[in-house]
Image (cartoon, rainbow, N blue to C red):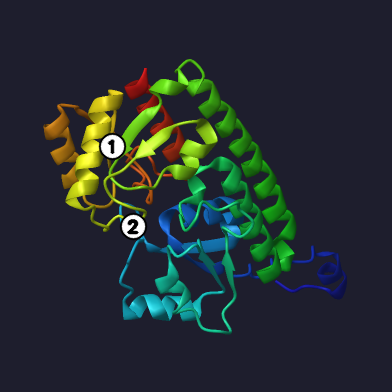
Amino acid sequence: MTFTRRALLAAPLLTFPAEAAAPLGIVASFSIIADLATRIGGPRVRVTPLVGPGQDAHGFEPRPSDARALAAADLVILNGRGLDAWAARLVPVKTRKVTVSNGITPLGDDPHAWQDPSNTKFYITNISDALTTADPAGADTYRANATLYLADLEKLDRHIRETYAPIPRARRKIVTSHDAFAYYGRAYGIDFLAPQGIAADSEPSAKQLATLIAQIRRDHITALFIENIGRNALLQTISRETGVRIGGQLFSDALTTKDGPAPTYLAMMRYNTATIAEALA
């Protein structure tokens, strides 16, 4: 079969799509930030957390493979406030990075700013801006995703406030494993007490522990919670000494895997709120 010149001219022009750009390689210091970056970046990014679900970012010991991942990243996302200083020290000077807690009103040296959704708005804006700088072609996508997520944070904040509204302020006292919920407490009028300090591996003195036990008895505190990271033996000791039952588990510094109750930041915050409210009711 032969083709005439006229037939060739009449044939439809075959076009081939341009090869899609490879997603940005993002390295996040720990799982909560990785989730936020994934939500804002969508398919334009590939996010890898150095500290994965269920792992503690406090005092994490990076491996050589982590240093290589940081060096190869298109963007490194850090929390700051001392939580992931081990990662900040390993980021090469030429590698683009962003500290997402910039702009918050800090509570001393406490790095757990994400426990207040109003602080997480700064995280989202800082991530969106950093992605736009690294990938200007995706600016519309990043802005649109950030706008949607900021609306989700507004809904989350309303939900938390409505959940606690029926609970008298004087009853809003609970004990957790380590001091990770101060921002949450400031936002929603809850007093959090903890035998350990800001770092999950800190150790209270015998006097501090005795003072906490005395306060639990004096204030008739009935809500004790272990956390998904850190050491919970102290809470078990407090439970035995006071007779107060441990009411469940809260998620502070790490998400769960997909099959757990807190696989995303939004799910974590809702789960913690429901768990706390049930204990205080």
Residue 183, horizontal then vertical, whole percent: 49, 44
Q: Which residue is mark 1?
A: 249
Residue at left offset 79%, top offset 62% = 12
148 up-or-down from 128: above or below: above
Label pair 1/2, CB-CB below 8 angstroms = no
87 up-or-down from 215: above or below: below
Residue at left offset 54%, top offset 36% = 187
Q: How packed is label 1: few (under 14 Cα within 10 Å), some, or many (20 or more)?
A: some
Residue at left offset 21%, top offset 53% = 205
**Left/right of residue 44 with respect to residue 72 in the rendered view:** right
Quadrant (top left/top right/bottom left/bottom right) for the N terminus: bottom right
Q: Which residue is mark 2?
A: 199
Amino acid type at circle 1 is Gln
- Out of 23 and 163, give the one closest to the viewer: 163
Tally of marks = 2
Quadrant of residue 86 within the rendered picture: bottom left
- Secondary element under disc 1, as helix, strand or loop, is strand
Residue 242, horizontal then vertical, whole percent: 16, 30
Q: Would you say residue 37 is visible in this rendering?
A: yes
